[in-house]
Structure formats: C-alpha cells, structure tokens
Image (tube, rainbow, N blue to C red):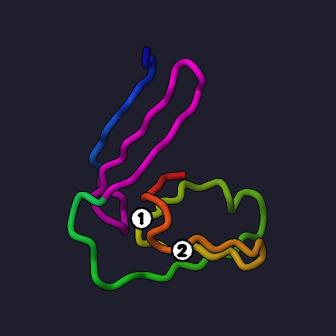
Amino acid sequence: MFQGVSKLMRTKIPFFRDVIISSFTCNTCGFSNSELSSAMEISAVGVEIKLQVKDALDLNRMVVKSDFAEIKIPSLELEILAGTQKGEVT
C-alpha cells in the first residue's frame, strides 16, 4: 500500500513565471521527487544566465530548470540538453 505525501502548488517565481510545482515523498523508503510545469504560455525568446562559482556558498541556492532549459558546466564536462528531462527544482 502506498504511504506517501503528494503536493501540487501554483506559485510565481520572481524573474521567471507562474509555475506548478509537484512534489512527492514516500514515507516508507524516503524517495522524493519534484517537477516543475509551466502554468502559463512559454516565451519564444530565451535568456542566458551565467554563474561563476567562487566558493561553496555560491552553490547554496535553489535552481529552477524548465523542460526547455539547457545546462552546461564546462569544468565538469557536463551538458544537459533541452527536452531531456522534466522541469525541476533543486
């Protein structure tokens, strides 16, 4: 039998847009998952954001990634292409 908590929440993220955040946590095994869906029309024009990490405190932030975002971290040779995963909050 399923024993967990599932939540849906509509919210506005400053400098981004209205989104629906869905989250799930299993009380039995502790697995958790969160996804982000747009609650409004997606703009045809994107934005490029660059962050230079200088120390560990720079990583202490929430990241919102839409389905259409592309992430590149050259120093780690990491690239997450647009459309390869659902919107996410980390």
The residue where tag 1 is placed is 66
Residue 63: x percent and y percent?
53, 59
Magenta span of residues: 12-37
Identify which residue is drawn at 36% across, 47% down.
21
| Res 74 quadrant in image | bottom right
| Res 59 quadrant in image | bottom right
Mark 2 or mark 1, earlier in chain: 1
Q: For marks 2 and 1, give the CA distance.
A: 11 Å
| Res 30 quadrant in image | top right
In the displayed structure, 64 sits above or below 73; it is above
Main SS class of the magenta portion in the image: strand
In the displayed structure, 25 sits above or below 60; it is above
The three-letter amino acid code for the residue at tag 1 is Ser
Residue 57: x percent and y percent?
72, 57
Q: Which mark is residue 81?
A: 2
Residue 58: x percent and y percent?
68, 62
Few, some or many C-alpha atoms within 10 Å of disc 2 (few <14, some 14-19, many ≥20)?
few
Q: Is residue 43 left or right of residue 14?
A: left
In the displayed structure, 24 sits above or below 79; it is above
The three-letter amino acid code for the residue at tag 2 is Leu
Identify which residue is drawn at 75% across, 75% down.
77
Q: Secondary structure at mark 1?
A: loop
Identify which residue is drawn at 21% across, 63% down.
40
Q: Which mark is residue 16?
A: none
